[in-house]
Image (spheres, rainbow, N blue to C red):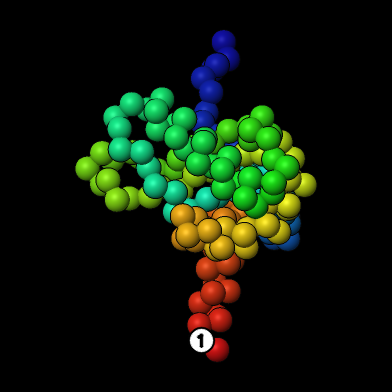
Amino acid sequence: MKNCSRKNKKTSVPAEPSGATSATSAHDNTTNNVGAVMNEIQERKNRENNLIIYGIEEKDTTSREERVEHDLVQTVEILKICDTHIQTKEVKKTIRLGKYDKEKKDKKRPILVTLEDSEKKSKIFKGAKNLKEIEKWENISLANDLTKSERESEKALHEKAKEI
């Protein structure tokens, strides 16, 4: 009778040529970079109809519904000053950014506004100078809704400008 016991043989996988490993990781890096760029493009596309309004007082109430209604009314009033032809229905949504804190009554959280189209947004920015002429709204400012990478780029540019 033959001995049927198996001997533990170490099997080795042939090593890849030295250039193959770096080529694979370079391919993975390229794939990751392409994915990151595609995500950034999609994120910018998602934000193209958005703008942020800074400086609107918050209504002093614990009722969320009353605060939301107040924000919508204030937002539409500001947008009408910037673009007299805007309708309330063209404002798809308004959202206060950040967490509501009833203890901080003087805090003015920014409002994210989503419009139906980017053309309206452009008209609003062109008319934003009209806000400075009205005392009630002179401290209001408008900004684009930027992605994280856009905010970081702008911050770096501001720092560079300060140095000059």
Q: Is residue 78 above or below residue 129?
A: above
Q: Amino acid at mark 1?
A: Glu
Q: Residue at (66%, 39%) from the top-left corner?
A: 115
Quick one: which residue is furthest to the front in this view?
Answer: 134
Residue at 69%, 40% (x, y): give it.
Answer: 86
Residue 6 lies, in percent from the top left, at 53, 23
Q: Residue furthest bottom?
A: 164
Asked if residue 7 is positioned above or below residue 117 in the image, the reply reads above
Asked if residue 127 is positioned above or below residue 6 in the image, the reply reads: below
Q: Residues within 10 Å of mark 1 (few under 14, many from 20)?
A: few
**Would you identify the image quadrant in which residue 26 lies?**
bottom right
**Going 73% across and 53% down the picture, which residue do you hit?**
122
Q: Is residue 164 left or right of residue 69?
A: right
Residue closer to the observer: 136 or 35: 136
Residue closest to the far right: 119
Q: Nearer the viewer, residue 125 or 73?
A: 73
Q: Nearer the viewer, residue 100 or 120?
A: 120
Which residue in the protein does label 1 denote? 163
In the rendered view of the protein, which quadrant contains the C terminus? bottom right
Q: Position of residue 125 (x, y in %)?
A: 67, 56
